[in-house]
Image: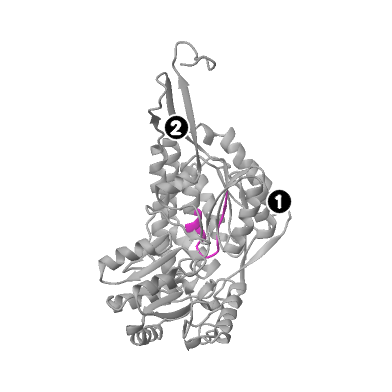
Amino acid sequence: MQTYQHWINGAYVEPASGTWLDTIDPYRGDAWAKVPRGNAQDAARAVDAATRAMESGPWSKMTATERGKIMRRIGDLTVQYAERLAQVETRDNGKLSAEMQGQLKTIPEYWYYYGGLADKIEGAVMPVEEHDVLAYTTHEPVGVVAALTAWNSPLQFLALKCAPALAAGCAVVVKPSEFASASSLEFAALTKEAGLPDGVLNVVTGLGAEIGAALVEHPGVAKISFTGSDVTGTRIYETAARSMKRVSMELGGKSPNIVFEDADLEAAAIGVMSGIFGAAGQMCIAGSRLLVQNSIKAAFTERLIDIAHGIKLGDPMHPETNVGPIATPPQFQKVLHYIDVAKAEGARCILGGKPAVGTGLTGGQFVEPTIFTDVTNNMRIAQEEVFGPVLSIIGFDDEQKAVALANDVVYGLVAGVWTEDMARAVRMTKTLKTGTVWVNTYRTYSFMMPFGGMKKSGMGRENGIEAVYEYLETKSVFLSVASAPANPFVQR
């Protein structure tokens, strides 16, 4: 049993409460580590450390180029310790080891990309109408950032929030989910080894209602970056509004994967399966609604079932495993509840629909890959985020109906379109109300491409150059070079 501590001001420290929370291995079903149960006192210590780092510490005096060099060293150390970090996160949240190995190849690129971008954030000189005035803009760090991350990809979320924030010159307090905190706590020590000054990156753990709420309410926090459910996001947004904190949020989704009859159907089938059963469906971008043209609906559904029969559930550490466990007990119960809701509303379960049992699955929280048909778009299973391996199939006749169905949800995170008609593809990218549209692919990412949602899927953007500006304030400067000040009471 490993016992972790908070990371505050460049050192591991005991929680003020003197208490810890068990972190459960979702595959084995037993506690493997303890993380601090932080409180408002711990939150204040971390915010104070971040404030000092920004106002009087070495970080405040570094040039952007110097900050960038440290960030690139963080990337190097992430590569060096990738195997250890991957093992810890898989043990913590049940994510496939194979998927973590892939993520740990990408995560260093965030640090390299934003490290290189740090000294390329430029202001502008404006040709204002006043002849004797030099007018220009500068960008300044917004202040201390509270980064609240989710349990399904803690290290990735930490990178995509902290790397642009540090490039902007901010200091950060990370609060990971209480269900998956270990990898973030281990990563924190690497930043000190890379030369990051004390207090610039802090990691505190505990329950959202305790230390998380204290961070959101703390007057020293200027900006909140949150990944999680829209319900929690709404509460954070309301709290932040009372003190005018800046907010960016990546929230839920109920994303459509739209397959037209002219698509490459084999490629589309693989894309649909990856989009809903990858990571056991525990993705904000899960393609949980399959919208398929009625002319191919029956045959396409049969192909999905054939592929699903070959999915192997099991130990996420084993390379042959395709789908791991549900990460937390509450989420496991939530997925099963939505399966019951779908059946009660009249959806027909044609695959799965219950907890998975069998050799190698005892002790874990497994749900069978589940497919529902006879679904209408007004059912809860088609409107509410399940966050599990549950697919709803809905038919459509034409492009206009496909767009109407796709947009008829409160979310707008991503969408997939499968068609060989490029004119249709372009039309769809314009009419779908989502932050990302994938055409003839799904779950394709780049740290260079902005990512975020419309409607209740959130606000702001992560990734790409746009992400840095989420952590900057623009300042306008008017510098008079006139030989004598203008008299405002004399008409010129």
Q: Residue at x 44, y 14 (%)?
A: 482
Rendered position, 290 above or below 185: below
Rendered position, 327 above or below 45: below
Residue type at mark 2 is: Thr
**Residue at the spot of label 1:** 40
Residue type at mark 1 is: Ala
256 to the left or right of 344:
left
Image quarter where the N terminus lies is bottom right
Is any atom of residue 5 visible in this view? no
- Of 215 and 263, which appears nearest the observer? 263
- Secondary structure under tag 2 reads strand
Region of the chain picked out in magenta, as a range: 146-158
Percent position of residue 42, x then y = 68, 50
Which callout, 1 or 2, points to the residue nearer the camera?
2
Q: Residue furthest top?
A: 483
Distance from the alpha carbon under mark 1 to that under mark 2: 37 Å
Magenta stretch contains residue 152: yes
Percent position of residue 345, x then y = 56, 84
Rendered position, 229 above or below 300: above
Magenta stretch contains residue 24: no
- Secondary structure under tag 1 reads helix
238 to the left or right of 162:
right
Query: Dot 2 surroundings within 10 Å: few (below 14), some, or many (20 or more)?
Result: some
Q: Kindly indicate whether the residue at mark 2 contacts the one at mark 1 (C-beta within 8 angstroms).
A: no
- Of 311 and 234, which appears nearest the observer? 234
**Residue at the spot of label 2:** 137
Q: Residue at x 31, y 69 (%)?
A: 440
Rendered position, 371 above or below 480: below
Percent position of residue 435, x then y = 43, 59
Q: Residue furthest right?
A: 17
